[in-house]
Image (cartoon, rainbow, N blue to C red):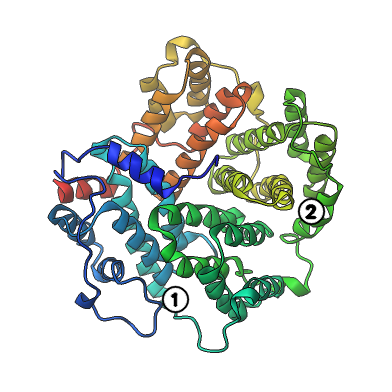
Amino acid sequence: MAGSFSRRNFLQSASAAGSFGLLGSSWLAQLPAVSAEETKPNPHSVQFTSDIEPIVQLLENTSQDKVLEEVASRIKKGTVNYQQVVTALQLAGIRNVQPRPAVGFKFHAVLVVNSAHLASLASPDEHRWLPIFWAIDSFKSSQAKDVTEGNWTMPPVKDGKLPAPHEAREQLVQSLDKWDEEPADIAAAVFARTASAGEIFEVLSRYASRDFRAIGHKIIYVANAFRALEVMGWQHAEPVVRSLVYAMLNFEGDKNPAENDYDADRPYRENQKRIGAIRMDWQDGKVDEGATKELLATFRKAKPGECCEVVVQMLNQGVSPQSIWDGMFVCGGELLMRQPGIVGLHTLTTSNAMHYAYQRAQLDETRRLLLLQNAAFLPMFRDAMVRRGKLSDAELLKLEPAEKSSANLDDIFAKVSSDRDAAARATLAYAQDSSNADEFIRRARLLVFLKGRDAHDYKFSSAVIEDYRHISPAWRDHFLAASVYNLRGSSDRDSGVLKRTQQALS
């Protein structure tokens, strides 16, 4: 299935990667599990499987200035492997970092794990541990922040009457509709124990995409969490699903959205009606570059509902969904170009998550809804950016390439640190003159390892690198050029975690 990565493929890729010259151990050797008896469980917090719980507690209980060295020591001794570290890292974040008051900020320690894994998977052997160790350090920072905000810990499932397996989905959906946290948590636990991954993803992807709160982080969390589970194993699904439900029920200080009419919720209600107006064979359309340009122009000025109506009209006129996605990806790149920063970059990470969910969804109705929700979110991003400051009048498709003499990677990534407009023009020239972007992508990813400062560096780079392949060739060069507005440059300062990681693993 496009857009997903199975655990078997992961193991095959990892095995093919060979051994770490730095560590002298196999990339994913099947090493002895750590006994759960080595640590005492906390009866007031959710517990994980016996092979992972001690590693989670190692991450939780070791100070930030020592945790990298402790994890590296166990890797070199052969008592933990890569899969166990990634699993423990995801679960430690879920248990210790609350997705409140917003699904973002400190919660990026959870959101970034899959992005770090993707970066690790695509890296040469000598760099594979860098993003994972960066993510471990990020978790410790978020854990400390959570302590100052009340020291939240995910509790065990509350005692009480659990729904029967055949009732769990209905109770979960009803609770999500009512934004009712406690019955939703109980239903989520039973649903995770008894339903298939596909059934669970179908429900959660719909509800994670229903509101614009947290600027897309809810659907980002669903996409990244399910991709992480493909590496971790489905036996860890229950706490992950509970965490997802808890996150998507965060309405950030508003009154109950089920009883109010907020801007953040309105497109979902309207789009549930619009999906019925789309022709049955909507996926059987033709790629239309003119429609992509028209859609991009619509996103510059129209309201969310108007953008969704245009998408419905185009689909009914026989335009391929690929051309719709092309317009949305290019729109995200243009918005980032018009106002580089935190909101602009989330236009692309959110579209990446929506597209992943769109590809993975099993029901035609869910796919239509995700397509329309992303079309609604983009003008909402635009308006959120306007509230933060002026947007430039730049149009991505009018970007002119630089002279070919400046279109080399050394110059491009030097300019990323000092003049992103010049870097974008040079990147466009490079892309137009190159048969592929593999070397640009390799350099961009390496600079994130060396210079990355926060979770957005990993989330953003993983998203745009992936979506570069999803976009039609006609738009790829400009999309790649837009990426430099949030990549790392060669003159940026080095990551503070880099030296510690190298020392810990050497």
Q: Where does label 1 land, which residue?
A: 154
Q: Residue at x 32, y 50 (%)?
A: 132
In-front residue for pair 199/448? 199
Q: Is residue 274 left or right of residue 371?
A: right
Q: Residue at x 51, y 35 (%)?
A: 485
In-front residue for pair 432/402? 432
| Helix, strand or loop for disc 1 | loop
Q: Is residue 449 left or right of residue 305?
A: left
Amino acid identity at mark 1: Met
Amino acid identity at mark 2: Asn
| Helix, strand or loop for disc 2 | helix
The answer to whether residue 19 shows anywhere in this view is yes
The x, y position of residue 474, in whole percent, is 63, 21
From the image, which quarter does the C terminus lie in?
top left
Q: Is residue 330 above or below residue 229?
A: above
> In the image, which disc is placed on residue 313?
none
The x, y position of residue 318, in whole percent, is 81, 31
Q: Residue at x 29, y 36 (%)?
A: 16
The answer to whether residue 101 shows anywhere in this view is no
The x, y position of residue 232, in whole percent, is 39, 57
Q: Where does label 2 land, which residue?
A: 271
- How many angstroms separate mark 2 from mark 1 (CA)? 34 Å
User: Dot 1, crowdedness within 10 Å: few (<14), some or many (≥20)?
Assistant: some
From the image, which quarter does the N terminus lie in?
top right
